[in-house]
Amino acid sequence: MSETQIGGVAATRIAAFAAREAEVYAAARTRTRAALQAGASPWLAGVPMHWMRDWPQPFPMLVAAAKGAVIEDLDGHRIDDFCLGDTGSMFGHSPAPVARAIRAQAGAGLTYMLPTETALQAGQLLCDVFGPMRWQVATTATDANRFALRVARAVTGRPKVLVFDGCYHGTVDDAMVCLEGGKTIARPGLVGQVEDLSLVAVAVPFNDLAAVERALAAGDVAAILTEPVMTNSCMVLPAPGFHDGLRDLASRHGAVLIIDETHTISSGLGGYTRVHGLKPDIFVVGKCVAGGVPTAVWGLTPELATRFAAYDATRPSGHSGMGTTLSANPLQFAALVATLSQVMTPTNYARMEAGAARLCAGLSKVVKRRKLPWHVVRVGARVEFICAPGPLRSGSDAATAHAPALEAALHIGLLNRGCLIAPFHNMMLISPATNRAQIDRLIAAFDAVTAQLFET
């Protein structure tokens, strides 16, 4: 009987490699292991946020410090960071302008539920960078997406949101759906899920405009909520004409088009939307928009803002269900202004693009030389290697291409060679602080790991 293959590698070989690398990792982190044994018990499942258990290491890495594109762990290892907080630190850890702005604001108060003059400056900068919209500030893109959906439902009077199978929009409840046998169902594994999500959402395949049109024809869809590129598993690029088709279908069927750029802000200045001339009704971005300070922004076109104002003037007084007390605090505005004006610049994006192109070419060369049945894809400063042939066209393609055991082995192998990539998929980011030597080290580490997995 032939042995099970995952991404072209025998499953037993993957398991043996992963076991060896786990031993190497653990032996190199005795201080970390001791600290976790002494201090993890107060936390649910031993970590302050459950995703921190999802890395492939035998126990979490404890970070002592991070600067630029380097993390130093508790045991003193300096690691080239290509995860960068899964986009939260896409411009590097603690960019100097942001750090200065935080220090300056810290002496003047951290939150007081009132705007500042800096807030006015931030609003103009948002228009300059992303386009002339009417903006609001949230703490996370999840919140921003929730609030955007409330606006869409308010102005349309419709209940449903259309999302794409395999999408990523944070932890928005309505987006936690998938397709199974052509039907919209709640994603498996949701904790404490009681609502029938098919009452408020419909899922269709990415890049399938005919499916979008069929869903919109029902007349109950308030909004299309989409990433410009599918990013939370194996990356899926939009087919030519897909976004133009979405815009046309949304307009013809009276749905609000929401573009969530929380990951695709890597595409260039202004995000994928501005780089590629998309025309959403609502624009959302979070994570790195304030240099790592928890911040998200969402903007409405002037036309949609006028429609919402008309609705708002007629609704009963009471709670809107939008906004949180710590959102739009002065620390966010200080970091937002510093990021938009001094960090999120054409020069930095050009540096990031050049580095990402170098990384993409280097990884692709290894894939080609070893004749791996894989491919490499890039969106601006974001690069992914995918352990399956490509290109991918939909979320179901991405799910099929996802190879958890192989990817986990690759990740810990790269980490043991000094390179950290995102734990949930094979995403790598280039920051303005990332240098050529770091990129070349990652390519060399990828070469070394794949050699051990594939060569006899």
Image: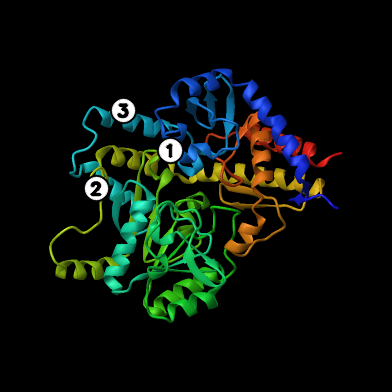
| Residue in the image at 53% along x and 24% along y | 72
Query: As displayed, is residue 143 above or below residue 160?
Result: above
Image-quadrant location for residue 260: bottom left
Q: Is residue 211 left or right of residue 17?
A: left
Tag in front: 1 or 2: 1
Q: Amino acid at mark 1?
A: Met
Q: Amino acid at mark 2?
A: Leu
Q: Position of residue 45 (x, y in %)?
A: 46, 35
Kindly tell me whether residue 223 is visible in this rendering: no
Is the residue under label 2 in contact with that under label 3 (CB below 8 Å)?
Answer: no
The CA distance from mark 1 to mark 3 is 26 Å
The CA distance from mark 1 to mark 2 is 34 Å
| Residue in the image at 59% along x and 64% along y | 394
Task: Point out which mark residue 49 bears.
Answer: 1
Is the residue under label 2 in contact with that under label 1 (CB below 8 Å)?
Answer: no
Q: Which one is earlier in the sequence, the residue at label 1 or at label 3?
A: 1
Local SS, label 1: loop
Task: Point out which mark residue 336 bears.
Answer: none
Image-quadrant location for residue 160: bottom left
Query: As displayed, is residue 298 above or below residue 415?
Result: below
Q: Position of residue 43 (x, y in %)?
A: 41, 31
- Residue under circle 3? 103
Q: Is residue 447 left or right of residue 160?
A: right
- Residue under circle 2? 120
| Residue in the image at 55% along x and 73% along y | 182
Local SS, label 2: helix
| Residue in the image at 68% along x and 39% along y | 409
Kindly tell me whether residue 245 is visible in this rendering: yes
The CA distance from mark 3 to mark 2 is 20 Å
Mark 2, Cα crowd under 10 Å, few <14 / some 14-19 / many 20+, is: few
Mark 3, Cα crowd under 10 Å, few <14 / some 14-19 / many 20+, is: few
